[in-house]
Image (spheres, helix red, strand yellow):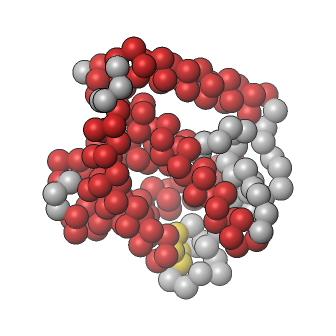
Amino acid sequence: MANVISLLFFFYFVTSIGGYLWEVIIFLWKDGTFRNRGFLYGPWLPVYGVGAVVFYLLFFKIKNRPVSVFLLSTLVGSGLELLIGWSLDTFWGLRYWDYSDYPYQLWGYICLYSALGFGIAGMLWICLLSRLLKMLWFKFSGTFRCAFNTLLILLLLLDVSAALIFPNTGIGITFSG
């Protein structure tokens, strides 16, 4: 059980950092500007990590059925994006994304492009990347794995504490809605 938990933490951190890099690259490409998206200061976006771990737990048993993984990732990812977007907007007046200018969108919270992105990303994650990362993770010693996760958990807790005391509200963090 400890090995599974350590793997899930590893997945969480790799994908949180990967999501951060993905969003930085998108804004560099679109606007030519660096943006630290999200409410934390460090190079991670927890929503990507949580999403990757949830998708892994939900879909790893069907990892040999990429079409099913694609369809389920599309539905679950879009459903979560809709629920999270609506909740943030309704209860806190926050808008971290807005798809209002995209075709086939719903209230600006989800759109066809993001839905397809969830499907493709989920399929790549479940059917390919998680397998490769799992093999890599278990090549390291148990001591290294424990130290690695402990260090990142402590850094994340420090970052969350800082963000709660001094919220990250810089330019480009949210859309005014």
In the rendered view, would you say 146 is above or below 13? above
User: On the image, which quarter does residue 163 sit in?
Assistant: top right
Residue at (50, 59) in percent of width and height? 81
In the rendered view, would you say 10 is above or below 18? above
Res. 170 in view? yes
Residue at (83, 50) in percent of width and height? 170
Task: From the top left corner, tell me how far across and down residue 73 is, in percent.
Answer: 34, 61
User: On the image, which quarter does residue 90 sit in?
Assistant: bottom right
User: On the image, which quarter does residue 27 sit in?
Assistant: bottom right
Res. 47 in view? no
Task: From the top left corner, tell me how far across and down residue 66 is, in percent.
Answer: 22, 64
Q: How many marks?
A: 0
Task: From the top left corner, tell me how far across and down residue 69 is, in percent.
Answer: 26, 61
Residue at the extreme top of the image, as rendered:
143
Task: From the top left corner, tell me how far across and down residue 10 is, in percent.
Answer: 42, 33
Horizontal side of 90 relative to 164 (left or right) equals: left
Horizontal side of 139 relative to 106 (left or right) equals: left
Q: Please identify the quadrant where the C terminus is shown.
A: bottom right
Residue at (50, 62) in percent of width and height? 82
Residue at (25, 21) in percent of width and height? 1
Considering depth in this image, is 72 or 16 the residue closer to the camera? 16
